[in-house]
Amino acid sequence: MGWTKEDLCSINGAFGHLAIFNSCLQTRSIDDKQLLHGILKIITSWRKQHEDIFLFSCNLSEASPEVLGLNIEIMRFLSLFLKHCAYPLPLADSEWDFIMCSMLAWLETTSENQALYSVPLVQLFACVSFDLACDLCAFFDSITPDIVDNLPVNLISEWKEFFSKGIHSLLLPLLVNAIGENKDLSETSFQNAMLKPMCETLTYISKDQLLSHKLPARLVASQKTNLPEHLQTLLNTLTPLLLFRARPVQIAAYHMLCKLMPELPQHDQDNLRSYGDEEEEPALSPPA
């Protein structure tokens, strides 16, 4: 699979061969981890030799269908590699850097091209970028102590402090923008195809990442609450999503709200003590 730049996107070249490998991986027809590790090394070399074929932080309206297709197949391969081969096969620091940096760059491209989501190939690009982010989240979420010993020393801290934070700082606002005020998206609509992998990824968001959100303020003037404004905004944004028609959105909202619930009582404690024996009902902190 050592191709010239002109052949990389050809159905008879790297693109076609990679699509075949991905199909075999999906059906578990290939179980040679060393072979798949070799393919990863080849893809990594493409990044060094043909940087412009990787659609990182760019306008997808300017990308050809062939280049879009190649990027989609590379993302699919990386997702399948993580599921089937990343452990116990030891990867070098540079290979982990390639996988995680590429994932985040593709995700940024997806976020920057929301106006093109109605284009089928762009929608597919978005879906597989979400899938790759989700598979990385799942990989790091399931790491056991024996796996940690075989990973690069700073990999876990880099994931938590930069890459995981980067994923969710992009996806939470993207979810809010994607659904807008429309609570009646059909389960079979094209938007729902994107919502499923996006929402599955958001189930891995941490409480600290939720609390450091950058969502636009969503406050209600008559709402009596002891919660700080950023927490009010989060609750007032997420709680209505429990009634959203698309099931993936409901599930993601449930997981995120479950992580927030333990935060609420501490903001009411001082308020409850101040009421004493007064007859007025205390103001607690449900969402509006």
Image (tube, grey):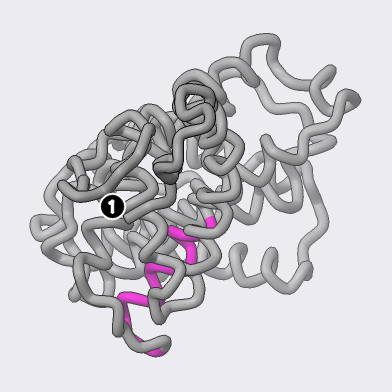
- Residue 28 in the figure: left or right of residue 225: right
- Residue 24 in the figure: left or right of residue 206: right
**Residue positioned most to the right:** 146
The residue that appears at 18% across and 42% down in the rendered structure is: 216
- Residue 148 appears in which quarter of the rendering? top right
Q: Nearer the viewer, residue 188 or 217?
A: 217
The image shows residue 49, relative to residue 1, as above or below, that is above
**Place of residue 260 in the rendered image (x, y in percent of width and height, measured from the top left):** 53, 41
**Residue pointed to by mark 1:** 174
The image shows residue 41, relative to residue 156, as above or below, that is below
Q: Using the rendered image of the protein, determine whether residue 45 is visible from the camera's viewpoint.
A: no
Is the residue marked by circle 1 packed among few (<14), some (14-19), or many (20+) residues within 10 Å?
some
Residue span colored magenta? 188-200
Q: Nearer the viewer, residue 215 or 202?
A: 215
Q: At label 1, which amino acid type do we have?
A: Leu
Q: Nearer the viewer, residue 169 or 117?
A: 169
**Place of residue 120 in the rendered image (x, y in percent of width and height, measured from the top left):** 26, 77
Q: Identify the secondary structure beneath mark 1.
A: helix
Q: Main secondary structure of the magenta part?
A: helix
**Place of residue 135 in the rendered image (x, y in percent of width and height, measured from the top left):** 60, 50
The residue that appears at 78% across and 67% down in the rendered structure is: 28
Q: How many labels were placed on the picture? A: 1
The image shows residue 181, relative to residue 165, as above or below, that is below
- Residue 247 in the figure: left or right of residue 46: right
- Residue 51 appears in which quarter of the rendering? top left
**Place of residue 288 in the rendered image (x, y in percent of width and height, measured from the top left):** 32, 56
Q: Using the rendered image of the protein, determine whether residue 176 is visible from the camera's viewpoint.
A: yes
The residue that appears at 21% across and 45% down in the rendered structure is: 219
- Residue 162 appears in which quarter of the rendering? top left
The image shows residue 214, relative to residue 236, as above or below, that is above
Q: Is residue 249 magenta?
A: no
